[in-house]
Amino acid sequence: MNYAIFKSEPIMTLNDLAQIGSYNKREKKAYNSNPDIKLELTKENIELVPLADKYVKGFYNLTKEYKKEHDERMKTEREDRKRSFKQMVDKSKSVVADELLFTATHEFFKDMSKEDIKKWAEVCMDFVYKDLGYTKEQVLHSVIHLDEKTPHIHCVVVPLVKKYDKRTNTERYTISKKQYIRDKLHLSELQDIYHKRLIDNGYDLEREN
């Protein structure tokens, strides 16, 4: 029995984002904590949404309008309340980014070619865009790791949105994962939708419990 697996892992600070970026892009010479990684196979990994920069630089590029808005607001803020953009996003109760993980039971990939795996990954990315509702501009980086035992996708998204602020009577930028995944119940519903998308595309997989 092969299972479809979709998980969401919140990334709470820019330091965490930097570390995840280093891992996903294989920027270290060794990964002692994960002996499954075969660095000689890393060249086989497939970039679905490439990112030339480090993750944090990519984050700043993606959120530059948000930063501009924040910096402008800080000009009129009380001295004891002034915070840099980094301080603000790090100390917010919301995420700075969300890591979406897609994979399946190891046996599912057994007889698949690299091209077959890429087609499966494209269905996963369709789910990100069409079902979760992220735009391509909100995807920081997405990669298929083929240098571990079981192929899997790391897709890092920044849920940057504009929301109406009652206090100031204006629309303001914010980062809000809840706009896309509200809670655990909603995540479970999304896992149903993800499973159906795979079935509809001809993949014989059970829904992970």
Image: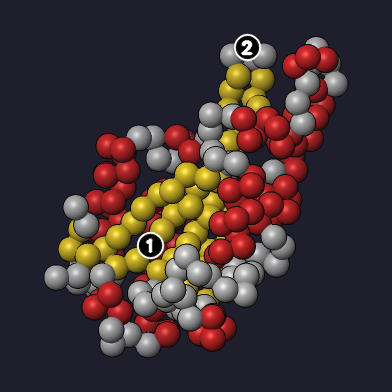
Residue at x 30% of width, y 60% of height: 5
Residue at x 64% of width, y 69% of height: 27
For residue 181, which numbered disc appears in the image?
none
Q: Residue furthest left?
A: 1
Q: Give coordinates of residue 185: x percent, y percent.
A: 27, 37
Q: Is residue 169 above or below residue 156?
A: above
Q: Give coordinates of residue 170: x percent, y percent.
A: 66, 20
Q: Give coordinates of residue 139: x percent, y percent.
A: 57, 55
Q: Quadrant of the N terminus?
A: bottom left
Residue at x 26% of width, y 70% of height: 105
* Pointer 1 residue: 102
155 relative position to 113: left or right: right
Q: Is residue 181 above or below residue 74?
A: below
Callout 2 crowding tier (Cα within 10 Å): few <14, some 14–19, many ≥20: few
* Pointer 2 residue: 167
Identity of the amino acid at label 2? Arg
Q: Give coordinates of residue 142: x percent, y percent.
A: 53, 64
Front-lying residue, 81 or 97 = 81
Circle nearer the viewer, 2 or 1: 1
56 relative position to 34: left or right: right
Q: Is residue 144 above or below residue 169?
A: below
Colour scheme of this structure image?
secondary structure
Residue at x 69% of width, y 60% of height: 54
Q: Residue furthest front?
A: 32
Front-lying residue, 157 or 83 = 83
Inspect this view and state whether residue 136 appears: no
Callout 1 crowding tier (Cα within 10 Å): few <14, some 14–19, many ≥20: many
The residues bearing labels 2 and 1 have C-alpha atoms spaced at a distance of 39 Å
Front-lying residue, 112 or 24 = 24
Q: Quadrant of residue 75?
A: top right
Q: Is residue 157 above or below residue 114?
A: above
